[in-house]
Image: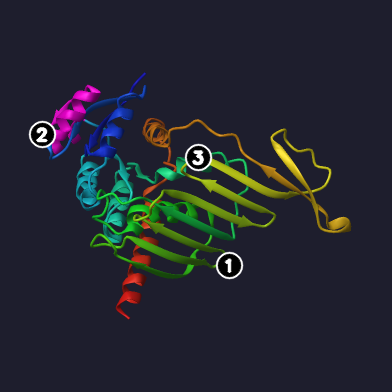
Amino acid sequence: MSKVIVGVVGTGHLGNLHTKFFSSIENCELVGIYDKNIETANKVAETHKTKVYDDLEKLLSETEAVSIVATTSAHYEIAKLALEKGNHVMIEKPITTTLDEAQELIDLAKSKNLKIQVGHIERFNPALVSLEKYNLDPMFVQTDRLAQFNPRGTDVAVVLDLMIHDIDIILSLIKSKVKNISASGVAVVSDNLDIANARLEFENGAVANVTASRISLKKMRKMRMFQRDAYISLDFGTGVSEVFRLEEPGVELPDYAISYGEIGVSDKKKTIVFEKPENIELNALQHEIQLFVDCVEKDIEPIVTGEDGLRALRVAQIIIQKIKETNIT
């Protein structure tokens, strides 16, 4: 069996995990890693039994795919070089710092028939994956993504650090264009926005209220979705989802479903059903990395494309700009 030849660029906390999982995938051969911080790279290489490259171009000349886990400001430069060298790329979120950079990478990848997968890891969270059998069509979404302060990631606003996860999921679920965005937020302990709230209004009437903070006393990663005949709750922290939905009377329910009686009158009655989808044992990052290798090997589109990354970045940038305008006035 031929294997996808892969390299990892960036060996910080997340880069270390990428190296670990790439080194364990059967249809992948990790040839080495690169980081400007040689000391850190050597430690990661020793742990995962791989090679350290002291020249990025040399690594890219010996790979067919590369995972970019460097700081956001370096994404564009590294990804452009990788694509020019003929590499498929996996880029941690956000795809780049600017929309023009993201579009240039997408165009370059298309011109060379190469893949770009953006690391929006929450798309692969068990809480969301467990809902694949449901017809998700939310008209109102409430998200709360709160984290305790960590200096890592404060080089960008919390909108790009945390909120962009929920932005990406919302854009993937609501199949309509964003019509209007309003937002507010403040910098508290860093030089960038540390807490932000945004309201996204879509052309089909759907609304999303999104909050992100990295100065919370406790962690929270929850999403609540409301749609016709259903309320769905997701806890990205535990990987568990819950569904309350209305079903026609007399319909046979699965064993794991609980009936809470009926609502309505006469022929308009419906059964209130509670379901807790099976908790999927899944490491989201490992699964995400495996799917990237598979899409390169099988020449298929990634689940999270460069275009997806661009859409999420565009909305995030508008939110940041709206907050700046609000704070000025």
Looking at this view, name the residue that lies furthest to the bottom: 329
Q: Is most of the magenta stretch helix, strand or loop?
A: helix
Instruction: From the top left corner, tell me how far across and down residue 319 is, in percent.
Output: 38, 66
Mark 2 is surrounded, within 10 Å at the Cα level, by few (under 14), some (14 to 19) or many (20 or more) other residues, namely: some
Please state, as top left, top right, bottom left or bottom right, where the N terminus lies in the image: top left
Q: Is residue 58 left or right of residue 69?
A: left
Mark 2: which amino acid?
Asp
In the picture of the structure, the residue carrying the numbered disc 2 is 54
Mark 1: which amino acid?
Gly
Residue at coordinates 71% horizontally, 38% vertically from top-left?
A: 257
In the picture of the structure, the residue carrying the numbered disc 3 is 239
Of the residues tagged 2 and 3, which is closer to the observer? Answer: 3
Q: Which residues are magenta?
A: 38-62
Instruction: From the top left corner, tell me how far across and down residue 193 is, in percent.
Output: 30, 63
Residue at coordinates 12% horizontally, 33% vertically from top-left?
A: 39
Is residue 87 visible from the viewing direction of this image? no
Instruction: Choose between 203 and 150: the one closer to the eye.
Output: 150
